[in-house]
Amino acid sequence: MKTKLYFILLAILYYPYNIYSQITPGFSICNECTDNYTQNNSNSQDTISGLFTYTDDEYETPDFTSDFGPRRIPGYDWHGGIDYNYSGGSDRGNAINSLEAGTVYAIIGTGLKYIIIDGENDFAYLHMFDIRNTLPVRSGNFVLTHLISDPTEYVIINLGTNTVIGEDACTSCVAYEGDTLDVDNEVLAGQAIGPVGNSPNYDIHLHISRIFDMTRPIGTHTGGNQILGDNNVTDPLEFIDHTGPEYDIKILKRGNFTNIDSFPEGIDLKYSQSGRSTTEILVRPVMPTTPQDDTDGAPYNSVLNISKVELRLANISLNDTFSLIQGPFFRSEIKMGATEDDNIAYPLRIGQSGSAVRRYGRFGFGNVQAKTGLYSFVYRDAGEDHHFYTTSGPRRWDDFYFTDFTTRVHVDDSLDEGGNIDMFADFPDDVRYNDGEYELFARVTNVRDSSFYSDTLSITIDNYMPYINSVTIIPGFFGEYVQYILDWYLTEMKINL
């Protein structure tokens, strides 16, 4: 186990994290693997004779290198799972332990090599073994090969336990070094199921995904409509042990600032004669920096683990309840599609393949159109710039942009995401957000359904000039009855009397 030094007194006084427990991610360190293998040499083999030795261990939160969701490493990528890296390149050959009991649903033995266990939560374990595709391939005590009768059905041999796992149980159906072996398709929780690797050609690490729909086609990559497609995986942290932060949630405005570290708090409401001006609202949930931060080279002592971010608005002049803002095209929430009960990301865009994929946020700048979505900083390479900004590199937050707050949106507008038809109100009686005093706050919900809140912000909406609605004339100084009433009401650009 890693030795970590904690400042006990400070931890008692201030520990802005939450411990979420359920399934402990275990593994075993391969003690001799790194010294006996060249990771990117397709002809390299383990040189040790006999069996490797292993030491049991557990992954901890500082071992995360990527969370579920957006990242830039480099370039934009939606990451459909979580990544563990215990000790850099020396992770190679470490034994992956199954998070739960189940049956082997699939083993892919070429290109991106992975195994899916059909259990209570249907976890997939990716990047096993290495770039070699000529079988058999050995890594530590594990051997990737195939059935005697079918070279396309792959199995994994554990030389340390003299067992074989595969999709179908069979007898004397695998050949290895002169022996014929039986295959079992059942695994136990905590059972070693294969080695950490770098297939097809990545840095060495373990990637874990949670499959939502096990009926999707099995493929060799993580795109499209396949079983590992981005729109068919949810965040494993809904069930795996981890440490999550107490977010410091800020509502910010960019203005003309080009340094992301200096955005002021608040919002600037925008108006125009046509009513079509949109107000951008930026929500920034910041992970804390504390003396408990890890010191062994890991990026953070907690994982971002956000499921959704919402903006909620209420007209306190009318004692309204807080609700999502309804813009011409989008409502004021961004959902990661991260959990079993809330697995549809919002908003979505349509990819070239015609399938719905997760949308990343883009701030408006010059002629570049802003769009509601998120812009990632937490999992970002050090040299990755911030585009129109002057800054670069990772930060302890992701930014969530809400770009569709239009104060003159018509009460009957249909909220047609991605459409070209919108409705705006020329008169106060038709507007969704009439003039008055409002309050606004942001809510962040993590994958364990815990919610965190920003401070409440007070704003005033003042779109329309005041007008006279009714005049009543009572004759005489002490008149006892109404002599004359004149009412005005507005409809279709006419004043009716």
Image (cartoon, rainbow, N blue to C red):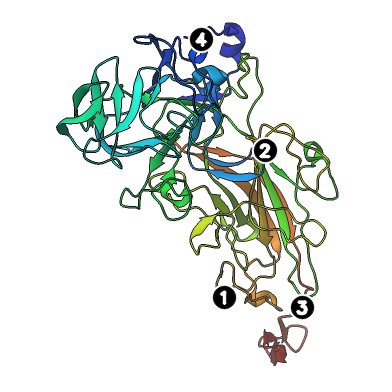
Q: Which mark is residue 377?
A: 2
Q: Quadrant of residue 318?
A: bottom right
Tag 3: amino acid = Tyr
Residue 442, percent from left and from top: 61, 45
Residue to which mark 3 is pinned? 467
Tag 4: amino acid = Lys
- Depth check: 432 or 446 in front? 446
- Depth check: 464 or 105 in front? 105
Residue to which mark 1 is pinned? 412
Residue to which mark 4 is pinned? 2
Nearest to viewer (mark 3 / mark 1):
1
Whichever of callouts 3 and 2 sits on the residue coming sooner in the sequence is 2
Tell me: residue 149, above or below residue 371: above
- Depth check: 195 or 461 in front? 195
Q: Which residue is painted at 81% across and 44% down in the image?
A: 389
Q: Answer whether labels 3 and 1 touch (C-beta < 8 Å).
A: no
Tell me: residue 475, above or below residue 398: below
- In three-dimensional space, the C-alpha distance between marks 2 and 1, rounded to whole angstroms, equals 37 Å
Whichever of callouts 1 and 4 sits on the residue coming sooner in the sequence is 4
Whichever of callouts 2 and 4 sits on the residue coming sooner in the sequence is 4
